[in-house]
Image (cartoon, grey):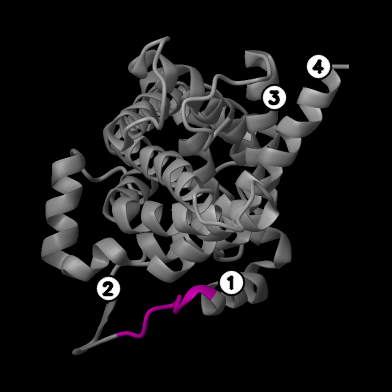
């Protein structure tokens, strides 16, 4: 169980995978409008108009959500939900489902006591990298659908939907294009996964040692918030590079994107969309971990019946 010290999981691996995929998908549905706002803010570059600098189109999380809803309709906020759910089934199921078995593998079978933080981080890095290597195409399609804003009259959409996007990318750019941005994506997801799962594990373990605290919804809520905050602080720079690389094919490499972003937009560009990112990841983690803990209880009750 995530946050259970060295406890071996008391539900089967398929049960853990199903619980993890379900929790990740539910959190995705609830928070994708904030993710769409985050992607638009991250890919927005400084616009120069005449002698001065034009005001950016998207400003702040709620402003961006409002602009998208006004210009493109409310449904535009759920752009990318289909590949988003594909991604969470694969990525969420694998990274969260494999965390406990991989962590136990790193500490060894006969380990007793609290798992060292470094082993938790290592397990999170491993499962995050493995999971996104499998799920990268779903991430690419999700970002491309989210990045497309309001089009001029008569201009056709690049893709008619998620499945059309997969096939169009393969046809026009080749199968390898589905793994565009894999470098920063592996870096981002390994780091964020380690930050989320290890910090949730650590915060929960620490809270449960405080007198009066039990393994309940309030503890899960606090642990989820802590996990979201750590994940955003650590992962924001790689997240910005990933969004820019996936949304714009003119960057030659991860380093090229990093250097150009730093040169053109300054160091604060790497924390662009920090508030929507925390709004998104903080709420995502709270919803996901609360759902995961309940889903695992439900699976356990079925399996032990």
Residue identifier under label 4: 303
Q: In the displayed image of the protein, which residue is found farthest to the bottom?
A: 52
Residue situated in front as seen by the camera: 95 or 55: 95
Which image quadrant: the C terminus? top right
> SS of the residue at dot 4?
helix
Instruction: Identify the mark nearer the N-term, 1 or 3.
Output: 3
Of marks 1 and 2, the one in the foreground: 1
Q: Are marks 3 and 4 in contact (CB under 8 Å)?
A: no
- Whether residue 60 appears in magenta in the rendering, the answer is yes
Query: Which percent across, then down, holds residue 95?
Result: 49, 28
Quote the CA–CA distance across marks 1 and 4.
42 Å
Query: Which percent across, then down, holds residue 82?
Result: 66, 39
Quote the CA–CA distance across marks 3 and 2.
43 Å
Res. 158 image quadrant? top right
Label 1 neighbour load within 10 Å: few <14, some 14-19, many 20+: many
Of marks 3 and 2, the one in the foreground: 3
Quote the CA–CA distance across marks 1 and 2.
19 Å
Q: Which residues are magenta?
A: 54-61
Q: What is the tally of numbered marks visible in this picture?
A: 4
Label 2 neighbour load within 10 Å: few <14, some 14-19, many 20+: few
Label 3 neighbour load within 10 Å: few <14, some 14-19, many 20+: many
Q: Which mark is residue 65?
A: 1
- Whether residue 57 appears in magenta in the rendering, the answer is yes
Residue situated in front as seen by the camera: 164 or 34: 34
Quote the CA–CA distance across marks 3 and 4.
13 Å
Q: Residue at x 32, y 32 (%)?
A: 116
Q: In the rendered image, is residue 173 in sight?
A: no
Of marks 1 and 4, the one in the foreground: 4
- Residue 70 horizontal side relative to residue 98, left or right: right
Q: Which mark is residue 18?
A: 3
Instruction: Identify the mark nearer the N-term, 3 or 2.
Output: 3
Query: Which percent across, then down, holds residue 223?
Result: 52, 53
């Amino acid at each position: 169980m995530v946050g259970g010290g060295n406890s071996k999981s008391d539900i089967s691996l398929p049960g853990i995978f199903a619980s993890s995929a379900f929790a990740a998908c539910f959190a995705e549905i609830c928070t994708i409008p904030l993710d769409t706002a985050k992607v638009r803010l991250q890919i927005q570059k400084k616009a120069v108009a005449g002698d001065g600098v034009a005001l950016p189109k998207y400003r702040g999380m709620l402003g961006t959500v409002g602009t998208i809803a006004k210009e493109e309709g409310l449904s535009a906020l759920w752009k990318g939900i289909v590949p988003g759910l594909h991604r969470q089934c694969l990525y969420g199921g694998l990274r969260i489902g494999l965390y406990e078995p991989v962590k136990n593998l790193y500490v060894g079978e006969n380990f007793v006591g609290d798992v060292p933080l470094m082993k938790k981080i290592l397990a999170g890095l491993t499962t995050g990298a493995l999971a996104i290597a499998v799920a990268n195409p779903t991430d690419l399609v999700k970002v491309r659908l989210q990045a497309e804003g309001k089009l001029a009259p008569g201009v056709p959409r690049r893709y008619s939907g998620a499945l059309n996007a997969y096939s169009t990318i393969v046809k026009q750019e080749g199968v390898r294009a589905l793994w565009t941005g894999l470098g920063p994506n592996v870096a981002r997801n390994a780091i964020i996964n380690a930050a989320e799962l290890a910090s949730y594990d650590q915060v929960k373990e620490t809270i449960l040692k405080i007198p009066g605290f039990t393994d309940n919804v309030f503890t899960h809520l606090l642990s989820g918030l802590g996990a979201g905050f750590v994940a955003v602080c650590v992962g924001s720079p790689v997240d910005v590079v990933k969004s820019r690389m996936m949304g714009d094919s003119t960057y030659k490499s991860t380093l090229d994107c990093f250097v150009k972003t730093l040169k053109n937009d300054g160091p604060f560009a790497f924390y662009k969309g920090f508030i929507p990112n925390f709004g998104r990841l903080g709420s995502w983690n709270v919803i996901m971990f609360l759902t995961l803990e309940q889903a695992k209880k439900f699976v356990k009750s079925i399996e032990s019946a």
